[in-house]
Amino acid sequence: MSSKRTIAVTVNGTRYERNDVEVRLTLADFLRHELGLTGTHLGCEHGVCGACTILLDGRSVRSCLMLAVQADGHELLTIEGIAPSADKLHPLQEAFRDNHGLQCGFCTPGMLTTLIEFLRDNPDPTEQEVRIAISGNLCRCTGYHGIVAAALDAAKRMRATR
Amino acid sequence: MKPPPFQYHDPRTLAEAIALLSRLDNAKLLAGGQSLMPMLNMRFVLPDHVIDLNRVAGLSYIKETAGALEIGAMTRQHEVECSDLVRERCPLLHQAILQVGHRQTRNRGTVGGSLCHLDPAAELVSVAAAHDATIVVTGPQERREIKFADFPVAYMTPAIEPNEIVTALRLPLWTKGHGAAFVEFARRHGDFAIVSAAALLERDSGGKITRASVTIGGIGAAPVRATEVEQAVVGKPASDQLFRAACESCRKLDAIEDIHAPASYRQHLAAVLSRRALEKASGLAADAPWNRMH
């Protein structure tokens, strides 16, 4: 029993340990404020907008709906970790750029992390399957059309390099 | 910091979790967190203690046992979605789970959490009602079983004692090859339904309906069984006309009103969706325009 804990997580392949973390701190705030990984965005902070989506042990989750202490010992992937190197984009990022899959960019980290898991499970999706996959991610700019096109284009590119 | 201050406990065994729950005042159990965490972030709940069940061993499983499908309370909704056993033996649950929230919430959300939250429109709660489920509950002294009909005692209030934990959901199975359909109306995919309908059907070799279960979710404080519809269709062969006439009785069900819909609209949806569910469960809806992917 305590209101503070030591938390050790692996994020994007790097191990981080932080002492005296308040147990009520959400995982999203832990990533942003304790680790400085501000690529994970926070929109609604109650599980509706999907902007804070990250991968926990390979599965997409809303990081605003988890306590940081619950991630202790787990492996996380955030938007900062998806590009293969500093000068090369992930095919999904390239497809978003080429298909106008983003405007302001606020929802983009959540869209990409959601789609990384989805395209891994379903490498050749239909348009409707893509729309359902991103139904938990709100975008207020694009009208979704560019995002859906980007996801389908990314799936094609990723299949080609398999 | 969004959530209010609390003490955090992460027991490793069910016995430890129950002991904590018995000892601590104003404690909340944290399962998948897809309802409790928003409530904490918005400070709708102010617990002194949060008991996290995520590291408790033995509560996550799906198995067939004595004519029933038993699902551990901490089984993630995503695991239910991917289970071949569920798809084959409990197709209603498979269809329903695809309409629970989104991929990201199903990866965390649990079966037991949804049952205990007991939202009037929750898909899993409707499946429990449709299958005459049994809820397995464990307390300091004993394990007991609650029939689903006795589980909701009031709006979002399950019949569990403060020192008890829901440990499993048991769904009695219908015969292999039975008809099942879960349809709902929501403004956006993944939202709680405004109204949902679940149908289960068994038919004899001549096509006559021998057993039926029709459940309406979102219309009352808990899902209700449309017993009048069930009685009207049993003994007859499935047809559009039969279902259309039988489902009219749903317009007489007591209905709640809120910002999403007035009672009369919910009653209308109950009549339409119960008919669609019966049509889909009996294979009459393959070409219907409303019958898309889910």
Image (spheres, coloured by chain):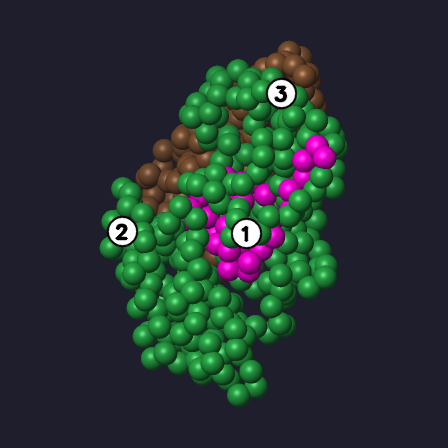
Chain colours: A brown, B green
Going by the image, does A14 lie left or right of A135? right
Helix, strand or loop at disc 2?
A: helix
Q: Which mark is residue B268?
A: none
Residue B81 pos. (x, y %): 59, 54
The type of residue carrying mark 2 is Ala
Magenta segment: B112-141
Q: Mark 3 sits on what residue? A: B24
Q: Quadrant of the C terminus of chain A?
A: bottom right
Earlier-in-chain disc, 2 versus 3: 3
Residue B114 pos. (x, y %): 53, 43
Q: Chain of mark 3?
A: B
Residue A66 pos. (x, y %): 56, 30
Q: Mark 2 sits on what residue? A: B263
Separation of marks 2 and 3 at Cα, in angstroms: 41 Å
Q: Are marks 3 and 1 in contact (CB under 8 Å)?
A: no
Residue at (63, 37) in percent of width and height: B165
- Viewer-closest of A160 and A6: A6
Q: Are marks 2 and 3 in contact (CB under 8 Å)?
A: no
Q: Chain of mark 1?
A: B
Separation of marks 3 and 1 at Cα, in angstroms: 28 Å
The type of residue carrying mark 3 is Leu
Do discs 1 and 2 belong to a common subunit?
A: yes
Q: Mark 1 sits on what residue? A: B148
Mark 2, other Cα within 10 Å: few <14 / some 14–19 / many ≥20: some
Do discs 2 and 3 belong to a common subunit?
A: yes
